[in-house]
Image (cartoon, rainbow, N blue to C red):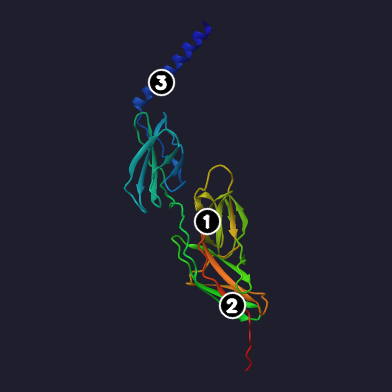
């Protein structure tokens, strides 16, 4: 019997609370405050997640209205959803497209608060699976008794070439090519730290087998804001490639030093893009290291 009385008492208090809140709502003309710190995180080529700090209201916020417009610098917002929590996943979006968002709060009396700050995000492009074209017109020229200079026409890529890899073998007709410039990655910062370096370098952000690759000059913030979000959960970091990114010139070069006079060397080159797609090898260039100095 005592337990039944307690249940009845709780239900009565709850009913009174709802009735009181409803009565307050009937007389409520005070709108909620604007949500603050609205942020957009790009998750993939079709998803952007929104997060914000809750609005305040004298009675209570009942829902948030999510509005969106499409295109850089857009201003024609359309309501896309209502929700009663302070986060939202906008899904099934077109890839490579800019979206701007704003949020406002609503209370039980249908009072609408002011809009939050604006925030924007650009959905990622679809995963890049297209390899660069193979380097062409590879030439090998004797520069000294111990040096050969290579040159080739730049590869073409739908996004951009980030590195060239040069391979060499010794002897006429050799086929056991070995890399001359193997790529290694050096840790430069943990998530939300500054990655310091000079000049323009290729930087990857993420961890394990999941990385986002970009090129930056004179350092970069190692964060989701700069690179977007490669994954949620485990901590992320930034690493710098040992190979400087190729310049914009149509002709690329490489210097091979410390060679042995009288030996025939064969070379081949391949290109790589930011998604680690590698091109086919160039045609082989062969040269015998025979150097003659001319005296005046």
Q: Which mark is residue 18?
A: 3
Badge 2 density bin: few <14, some 14–19, many ≥20, Cα 10 Å: some
> Is the residue 178 above or below the residue 229 in the image?
below
Q: Is residue 124 left or right of residue 292?
A: left
Sequence-first tag of 2 and 3: 3
Q: Of helix, strand and loop, which one carries label 3?
A: helix
Q: Which residue has dot 2 on it? A: 287
In which image quadrant can residue 165 be found?
bottom right
Q: Of helix, strand and loop, which one carries label 2?
A: strand
Real-space CA distance between mark 2 and mark 3, rounded to the nearest whole angstrom: 89 Å
Sequence-first tag of 1 and 2: 1
> Is the residue 10 above or below the residue 214 in the image?
above
Residues 242 and 97: in front is: 242
Badge 3 density bin: few <14, some 14–19, many ≥20, Cα 10 Å: few
Sequence-first tag of 1 and 3: 3
Residue 99: percent from the left, percent from the top? 39, 49
Badge 1 density bin: few <14, some 14–19, many ≥20, Cα 10 Å: many
In which image quadrant can residue 287 be found?
bottom right
Q: Choose mark 1 or mark 3, whichever is in front.
A: 1
- Which residue is located at x 52 percent, y 64 percent? 271
- Which residue is located at x 65 percent, y 77 percent? 263
Q: Of helix, strand and loop, which one carries label 1?
A: strand
For the C terminus, give its image quadrant: bottom right
Residues 215 and 119: in front is: 215
């Amino acid at each position: 019997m005592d337990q039944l009385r307690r249940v009845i008492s709780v239900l009565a208090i709850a009913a009174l609370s709802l009735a009181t809140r409803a009565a307050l709502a009937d007389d409520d003309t005070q709108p909620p405050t604007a949500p603050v710190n609205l942020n957009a995180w790009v998750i993939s080529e079709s998803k952007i997640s929104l997060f914000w700090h809750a609005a305040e209201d004298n009675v209570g916020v009942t829902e948030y209205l999510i509005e969106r417009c499409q295109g850089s610098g857009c201003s024609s917002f359309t309501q896309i959803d209502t929700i009663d929590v302070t986060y939202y996943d906008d899904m099934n979006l077109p890839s490579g497209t800019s979206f701007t968002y704003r949020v406002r709060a609503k209370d039980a009396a249908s009072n609408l608060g002011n809009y939050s700050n604006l925030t924007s995000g650009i959905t990622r492009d679809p995963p890049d699976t297209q390899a660069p074209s193979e380097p062409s017109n590879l030439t090998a020229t004797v520069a000294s008794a111990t040096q050969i200079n290579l040159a080739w026409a730049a590869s073409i890529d739908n996004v951009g070439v980030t590195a060239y890899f040069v391979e060499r073998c010794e002897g006429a007709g050799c086929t056991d090519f070995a890399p001359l410039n193997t790529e290694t990655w050096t840790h430069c910062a943990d998530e939300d730290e500054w990655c310091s370096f000079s000049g323009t370098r290729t930087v990857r952000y993420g961890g394990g087998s999941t990385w986002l690759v970009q090129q930056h000059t004179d350092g970069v913030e190692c964060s989701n804001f700069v690179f977007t979000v490669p994954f949620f959960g485990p901590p992320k970091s930034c690493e710098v490639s040992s190979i400087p990114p190729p310049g914009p010139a149509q002709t690329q070069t490489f210097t091979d030093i410390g060679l042995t006079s009288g030996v025939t060397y064969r070379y081949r080159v391949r290109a790589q893009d930011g998604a680690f797609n590698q091109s086919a090898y160039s045609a082989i260039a062969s040269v015998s290291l025979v150097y003659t100095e001319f005296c005046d």
